[in-house]
Image (cartoon, rainbow, N blue to C red):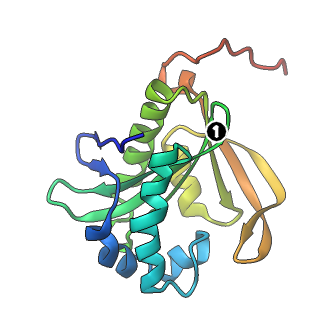
Amino acid sequence: MEPVTLTTDRLLLRTVGPQDTDTVYAICQDPDIQRWTTIPSPYLPEHARGFTEQIAPDGWANGSMFTFGVFLPGGELTGMLGITMRALGTGEIGYWAAKEHRGNGYITEAALAASRWAFTRMSVDRVEWRAEVGNTASRAVAERAGFTVEGVLRSSLNNKGVLRDCWVGSLLPSDLGLPSTAPYVPGLG
């Protein structure tokens, strides 16, 4: 599918391309991004090029991953967010924020906008969030966006060849007052 652009009160969410490569490279030099995400470390210029020129466009083209750069109206990149399709009706959200833009709620706002889009335009009924246990910044974003933290998955996240425990959470259409593609009956107690 063709990439879409989303807007919020403060942000423009659009796919990334070659014009964003240098900025993505510079932001991803942040040790926290390299530590807590699955991007390569060290993060080299060719990794940024591969991401902006191949991985992001290919994900849109084949419908496997929908990557949005999170931009301020003036064009400054504040972070990155993607929804990767994991199963029929289920997407997994991932994100990072540029160090100088953390704490402004931009990624929370973007996560809500992208999830709403996935629910209303992509027939997604569950957006999952996973983060390595200890990544409290990612968890705070997920919780502020309305995700329900469901538990810990042992040895479930492979980060640079090391299996780690991860938190898992979900956001459902009903959490945003939206209908699901199929009825949902929660389990009893």
Residue drawn at 81 percent across, 20 percent down: 187
Residue 159, visible in the rendered structure: yes
Name the side, left or right, on which 104 lies relative to 122: left
**Of residues 68 and 55, which is closer to you in this image?**
55
Mark 1 neighbour class, 10 Å CA radius: few under 14, some 14 to 19, many 20 or more: many
Is residue 10 or residue 117 the one in the foreground? 117
The answer to whether residue 104 is above or below residue 30 is above
Q: Residue at x 23, y 40 (%)?
A: 9
Tally of numbered tags: 1
Residue ID for mark 1: 170
Residue 97 visible somewhere in the drawing = no
Q: What residue do we see at 39% from left, 67% from top? A: 53
User: Where the C terminus falls, by quadrant?
Assistant: top right
Q: Residue at x 45, y 58 (%)?
A: 56
Write down the quadrant of residue 100 in the picture.
Answer: bottom left
| Residue 87 shown left or right of residue 52 in the figure | right
Q: Position of residue 113 (x, y in %)?
A: 39, 38
